[in-house]
Image (spheres, helix red, strand yellow):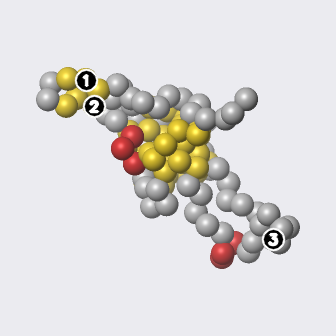
Amino acid sequence: MAKVKIKPLSDRVVIKPEPPEEKTESGLYIPDTAKEKPQRGTVIAVGPGRVENGTKIEMSVKEGDKVLYGKYAGTEITIDGEEYLIMRETDILGIIEEEK
């Protein structure tokens, strides 16, 4: 079976959420029923941008960016057994930049 690739339209992005925390900082394991929904992930694919008043607005995020998004943002989808989110760029709260 061929691998499926998603190409988002307009100002939408596809995000691979980070897995939820398995244990607390103090070492306690978190049961599945108490795990928080992840709010961080990696951008897998981006759309071409949107057109506003006849002007094309480029996307601010790119593939590979680590981003923060709202807890209930986006639409959850499953492709080839992998969980992804599709959301508008405006649902992304920020880009995480690693300090060197």
SS for callout 2: strand
CB under 8 Å between callouts 2 and 1?
A: yes
**Residue pictured at 72% horizontal, 60% vertical:** 21
x, y percentage for residue 5? 52, 33
Q: Is residue 56 visible?
A: yes
Q: What residue is disc 3 on?
A: 29
The answer to whether the residue labelled 3 contacts the one labelled 1, judged by CB atoms less than 8 Å apart, is no
Q: Nearer the viewer, residue 83 or 30?
A: 30
For residue 56, the mark is 1
- Which residue is under mark 2? 50
Residue 40 screen position, x and y as percent: 58, 49
Q: In what element is the residue under mark 1?
A: strand
Q: Report the amino acid beneath label 1.
A: Lys
- On the image, the x and y values in percent for residue 74 come to 42, 53
How many dots with numbers? 3
**How many angstroms separate mark 3 from mark 1 (CA)?**
47 Å
